[in-house]
Amino acid sequence: MNNYNKLLNNLERLKLNRFKEEKLNVSLKKESADITLPGNNYKKGIENPFNKVKKEIEDIFVGMGYTVETGPEIDSDKYVFELLNIPKDHPARDMQDTLYIDDTLLLRSHTSSVQAHIMEKAKGKPIKIICPGKTFRRDDDDMTHSHQFAQIEGLVIDKNINLGNLKATLELFAQKMFSKDSKVRFRSSYFPFTEPSVEVDISCFNCHGKGCPTCKGTGWIEILGAGMVHPNVLKMSGYDPEIYSGYAFGVGIERVTMLRYGVDDIRKFYQSDIRFIEEFNKKVEE
């Protein structure tokens, strides 16, 4: 009896295996693939140099203890101008030919408006921030100008802050971004929200100060504007200028990228031309 049962079980297994094999053969015929067809060619994506430099700048300042803050690209006249010591009808507004939506709303012309928001929220407490983002002005587009560009602005407010702190910060930034032997030079300038105000030059990272086409033979490259926060700006945001001081700076991301990688036309960052991205990628690999 046991032998009979074993024989039946063996027959059932044989039938089941045969059934599975027949089913597989039918499926293979229906789902046959032509293995001679070429496979899909997937290209690895390439990062736009603008985004690469933006991330690097953020990483540098985050490493110094700054926090990253963002704000609205459409903002009110109060934050873009008035809280930054640029009242209505002030001649300083002519420096930033601006795109208005109505009498009070406009496309921000600098990311300093984010600083005004943060100062208002801080209510007299210390601040150490950077503000990256798009800005807009009524510029005619050419090789070095664009109606839309990006800035990273920095703001530090605390007790006993001075120009020496600002210079040391910017020198460290230049050394990390361009060259380990970079030096920083201040030249007197004017910005309505800082006093004193300075234009900031860095020693040429290409010739190391000897003079070359990159620096137009001067050994220095103008890179950003900065200064000590104006006492009026501190007062309007609830800070006592007798106790608190601060510095602010603003750098154009496209300008840093153009200098670092030798890009000759700012419009290339926005034209979505894959040939430009591929060319940049080759330079990085070299």
Image (cartoon, helix red, strand yellow):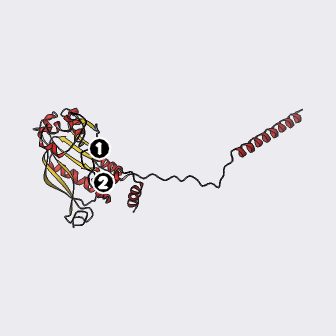
Q: In which quarter of the image is the C terminus?
A: bottom left
Residue shown at 68%/45% (left/top)?
31
Q: Distance between the residues labelled 2 and 1?
A: 14 Å
Does the rendering let one see residue 223? yes
Which residue matches tag 2?
266
Label whose residue precedes the other's in the sequence (2 or 1) = 1
Label annotation for residue 134: 1
At which x and y percent is residue 74? Answer: 27, 37
Disc 2 on helix, strand or loop? helix
At which x and y percent is residue 98? Answer: 22, 42
At which x and y percent is residue 186? Answer: 15, 54
> At label 1, which amino acid type do we have?
Lys
Above or below, comparing residue 2 to residue 132 in the picture: above
Disc 1 on helix, strand or loop? strand
Above or below, comparing residue 150 to residue 9 in the picture: below
Give whichever of 177, 5 is nearer the camera: 177
